[in-house]
């Protein structure tokens, strides 16, 4: 397999991976290198790429700043030949299905058929005659006979282009056979055609075209007349980004921009959701007390409850146009509590996702941190501690019918990013972006002590014996503090970039885990201050890490929308 990069600076690399080695690594936990080639030829970004049908060659298409078509030898990673794709921007490239000397590119107001002579090496393009049709072509699929290419447009039509052409001749020789458009669909798909795939009707031998659209529609068209077949259409959640025929040929694998993967059965066109994840940055994660099988994540516009063993979504709670910055759950697991960017605290029933209560104007700005006190929710009131972008720490007395603010504490001068409460609910510690951590008395609601550091504190927590406090932040360090007098005990270099999250083993406190902006999850020995394990996998900044209650796994979430479940090794 191969992938291209999107960068604002040069160069943009194409990475070729060995998929079989990657699968073997997953099965055997080996560390064999899966990267085969790193190809550097394009500038800015790689717009599209495609392997030839025999996997001998790879065609890559550069982005707007580059707009070059390059043919590579897949085995050696050697560039064979290249050429500007067109006078205007090229957006997609596809090889023919049964020959390795012809491919199709398309983009802004053009479709071109290329003949490639590897032995010369040389490549030559003929631009298809489109008549009065001027469209931005966003996707291309070639039929099984390599006679026609189907082009999806930004305005929602599907074009049928005959791609037969002359071989490469002399420089002054006339072109007798030129590619040309032969038809287009009368129906337009909402928000444009985003991807295409071709099938063959085994009964009639006709081409069938699978169309994925920006409005989430997947439809099956007759290739000749380009009309939708009745009953062969489905609406999915999110713009369709990819369509592929399953290996068994009994259905289609369809991906959407909302991180949903569907299986569409053929020929009845039934829809089954196979996998899903967050489509935006994941901000927080938590486990119910004593339950390692379920965890909760918060992200842009939603909260989700997951089965950790099956890796399946159990519940989705959606609040449109808002981000959930933090999430927690009461000790008995009967209420999910969340903080949102509109300054409200929302509580939900974990079984149904139904709204339980809302604390309006909990903070003047976004609610950035929260902690639930270790109190019995069945004997109200129980207390909730929240922190906001306004620098305030507030304590709330919550009952099923009423939520009242007990105290508002204003000593931080910037956003409160982390709050932790002791087991006996007598104290809590809050960490702020202003470089201060404050320990509060939860009975008298006064400050007990404060300690400062020239950093943006991102996370804080108590050691299980509550004698020490652990913090991390923008100074790339993990700091140990005395919980009695606030004196620094130890400072450990934690990362080459900003440290973003911490969690500690809740029983003995022998190990803790950290996440950082360098995309690494690290497992630490608490007393030695040494990293005993490093987890590689995230492609974005890590937002939060959490031990499971049974101490067998760690869940990490990141800004790229990924959720990783890591196995905790024996110490």
Image (cartoon, grey):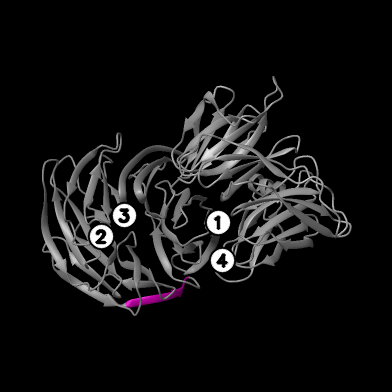
Residue 396 or 332: which is nearer the viewer? 396
Q: Which mark is residue 108?
A: none
Q: Which mark is residue 366?
A: 2
Q: Circle 4 sits in a helix, a strand or a loop, which is it? A: loop
Mark pair 1, 2: CA separation:
30 Å
Residue 532 placed where, x, y %? 53, 63
Left/right of residue 39 with respect to residue 418 in the rendered view? right
Residue 451 placed where, x, y %? 27, 76
Q: Is residue 192 magenta?
A: no
Residue 479 placed where, x, y %? 38, 73
Q: Are marks 3 and 1 in contact (CB under 8 Å)?
A: no
Magenta-highlighted residues: 488-494
Q: Nearer the viewer, mark 4 or mark 1?
A: 4
Q: Which mark is residue 7?
A: 4
When the figure is inspected, residue 549 is found, relative to residue 220, above or below; the finding is below
Q: Is residue 245 visible?
A: yes
Tell me the residue at 67%/33% (across/down).
Answer: 247
Q: Which residue is mark 3?
A: 326
The image quadrant of residue 537 is bottom right
Q: Which residue is mark 1?
A: 537
Q: Circle 1 sits in a helix, a strand or a loop, which is it? A: loop
Q: Residue furthest top?
A: 203
Q: Circle 3 sits in a helix, a strand or a loop, which is it? A: strand
């Amino acid at each position: 397999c191969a992938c291209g990069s999107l960068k604002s600076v040069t160069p943009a690399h194409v990475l070729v991976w060995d998929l079989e080695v990657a699968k073997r690594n997953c099965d055997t936990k080996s560390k064999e290198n899966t990267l085969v080639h790193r190809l550097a030829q394009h500038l800015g970004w790689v717009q599209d790429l495609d392997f030839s049908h025999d996997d001998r060659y790879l065609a890559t298409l550069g982005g707007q700043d580059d707009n070059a078509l390059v043919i590579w030898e897949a085995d050696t990673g050697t560039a064979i030949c290249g050429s500007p794709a067109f006078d205007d921007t090229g957006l997609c490239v596809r090889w023919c299905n049964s020959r390795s000397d012809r491919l199709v590119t398309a983009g802004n107001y053009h479709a071109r058929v290329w003949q490639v002579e590897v032995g010369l090496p040389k490549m030559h393009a003929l631009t298809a005659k489109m008549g009065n049709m001027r469209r931005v072509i966003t996707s291309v699929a070639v039929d099984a006979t390599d006679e026609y290419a189907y082009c999806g447009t930004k305005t929602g039509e599907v074009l049928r282009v005959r791609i037969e052409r002359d071989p490469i001749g002399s420089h002054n020789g006339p072109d007798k056979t030129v590619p040309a458009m032969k038809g287009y669909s009368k129906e337009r798909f909402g928000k444009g055609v985003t991807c295409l795939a071709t099938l063959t009707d085994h009964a009639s031998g006709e081409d069938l075209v699978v169309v994925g659209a920006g409005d989430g529609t997947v439809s099956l068209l007759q290739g000749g007349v380009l009309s939708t077949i009745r009953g062969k259409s489905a609406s999915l959640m999110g713009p369709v980004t990819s369509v592929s025929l399953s290996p068994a040929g009994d259905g289609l694998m369809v991906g959407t921009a909302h991180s949903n993967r569907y299986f569409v059965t053929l020929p009845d066109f039934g829809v089954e959701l196979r996998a899903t994840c967050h489509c935006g940055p994941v901000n927080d994660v938590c486990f119910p007390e004593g339950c390692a099988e379920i965890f909760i994540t918060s992200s842009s516009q939603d909260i989700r409850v997951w089965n950790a063993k099956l890796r399946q979504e159990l519940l989705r709670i959606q609040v449109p146009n808002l981000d959930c910055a933090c999430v927690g759950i009461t000790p008995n697991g009967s209420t999910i509590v969340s903080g949102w960017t509109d300054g409200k605290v929302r509580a939900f029933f974990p079984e149904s996702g139904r709204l339980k209560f809302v604390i309006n104007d909990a903070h003047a700005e976004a609610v950035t941190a929260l902690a639930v006190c270790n109190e019995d929710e069945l004997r109200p009131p129980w207390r909730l501690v929240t922190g906001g972008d306004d620098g305030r720490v507030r304590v709330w007395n919550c009952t099923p019918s009423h939520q009242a603010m007990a105290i508002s504490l204003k000593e931080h001068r910037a956003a409160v990013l982390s709050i932790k409460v002791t087991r006996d609910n007598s104290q809590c510690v809050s960490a702020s972006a202003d470089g201060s951590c404050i320990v509060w008395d939860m009975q008298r609601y006064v400050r007990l002590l404060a300690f400062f550091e020239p950093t943006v504190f991102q996370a804080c927590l108590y050691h299980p014996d509550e004698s020490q406090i652990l913090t991390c932040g923008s100074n790339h360090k993990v700091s140990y503090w005395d919980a009695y007098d606030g004196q620094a005990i130890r400072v450990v270099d934690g990362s080459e970039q900003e440290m973003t999250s911490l969690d500690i083993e809740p029983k003995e406190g022998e190990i803790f885990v950290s996440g950082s902006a360098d995309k690494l999850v690290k497992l630490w020995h608490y007393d030695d201050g040494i990293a005993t394990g490093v987890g590689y996998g995230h492609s974005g900044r890590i937002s939060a890490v959490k031990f499971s209650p049974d101490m067998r796994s760690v869940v990490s979430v990141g800004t790229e929308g990924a959720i990783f479940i890591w196995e905790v090794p024996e110490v």
